[in-house]
Image: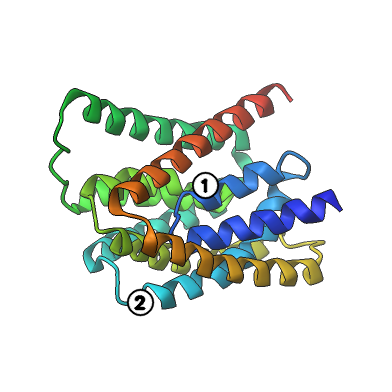
Amino acid sequence: MLETSLLLFAALIVGFSKGGLASAAAIAVPMLSLFMNPVTAAATLLPVFVATDWIGVWLYRKDYSRRNVAILLPSILLGVAIATVITPYTPEWALLIFTGLIGLWYIARTWGRALRQKEAPEPTRPDVAPGVFWGTITGVASFITHSGAPPVQAYLLPQRLPKLEFAGTVAISFAIGNLVKLPAYWSIGQFDGLRWGLVAALCVTGMIGTYGGRWLTAHLPERAYRIVIEVFLLILSVVLLVKGGLDIYG
């Protein structure tokens, strides 16, 4: 009963993230990994990600950065292709720690700048080189642990996009990336033995959460929205580092 409740809660978190609270979803797999195999957790939640992705695309179909999507999407797909090849040979703890460090690096940089100056730093531009770098890392991290939020935010948040445009860019980029992960997961056997009735219930729960996330995103002030995203990112990064450290000695 507790396991099912946590799975439903994880699906709700995924839905909230696809509704606009972008960092939240990546907490789901580490949370489930406390009581189930991380590979099984990632495979169980992937259909939830795919189902909620396309609701997010519909909700934000008019609010996204075309240039950022054009840069990120092929980069994420490249990362998924790389991860499909290296997953059987890469220790999960290594990616968990690496992804967590990216999140902490971004938070330290952003909050450090805020402490050193009264005015916010100038927004960065959606340049190709950093977009390809962070997009590829996003694809790899997203494939193995669904933890693609920290690297994609490291690229997007410094641009200080309007909150709906930020949410839409993330929603569209991950929608295509997660859809491509379905045949990749199948090809390496990660869907073997899943309880598909439970997966269907999780998808419905995630879809409900998507509309809740959209409501919060629309009603939170810009500053509050950014703080919420950054706090989620900080919590996620710490969770990933702790989980990766425990896996080394586990």
Dot 2: within a 10 Å radius of its alpha carbon, few (fewer than 14), some, or many (20 or more) residues?
some
Q: Which mark is residue 104?
A: none
Going from the N terminus, do you reach mark 1 or mark 2 first? 2
SS type, badge 2: loop
On screen, residue 24 versus residue 112, left or right, reads: right
Above-or-below relation of 208 to 127: below
* Point 35% across, 76% down: residue: 61
Residue 234 at x, y = what percent? 46, 35
- For residue 67, what is the image quadrant? bottom left
Residue 182 seen from this side: no
Residue 117 at x, y = what percent? 15, 27
On screen, residue 14 versus residue 136, left or right, reads: right
> Which residue is tagged 2?
61
- For residue 118, what is the image quadrant? top left
User: Which residue is farthest right?
Assistant: 1
Residue type beneath disc 1: Ser
Q: Nearer the viewer, mark 1 or mark 2?
A: 2
SS type, badge 1: loop
* Point 31% across, 58% down: residue: 163
Residue 196 at x, y = what percent? 78, 70
Residue 140 at x, y = what percent? 48, 49
* Point 63% across, 32% down: residue: 243
Rounded to the nearest angstrom, the CA distance separating label 1 from label 2 is 23 Å
On screen, residue 203 versus residue 129, left or right, reads: right
Above-or-below relation of 15 to 160: below
Quadrant in the picture for the C terminus = top right
* Point 35% across, 47% down: residue: 224
Q: Which mark is residue 147?
A: 1
Question: Number of labelled discs?
Answer: 2
* Closer-to-camera residue (117/131): 117
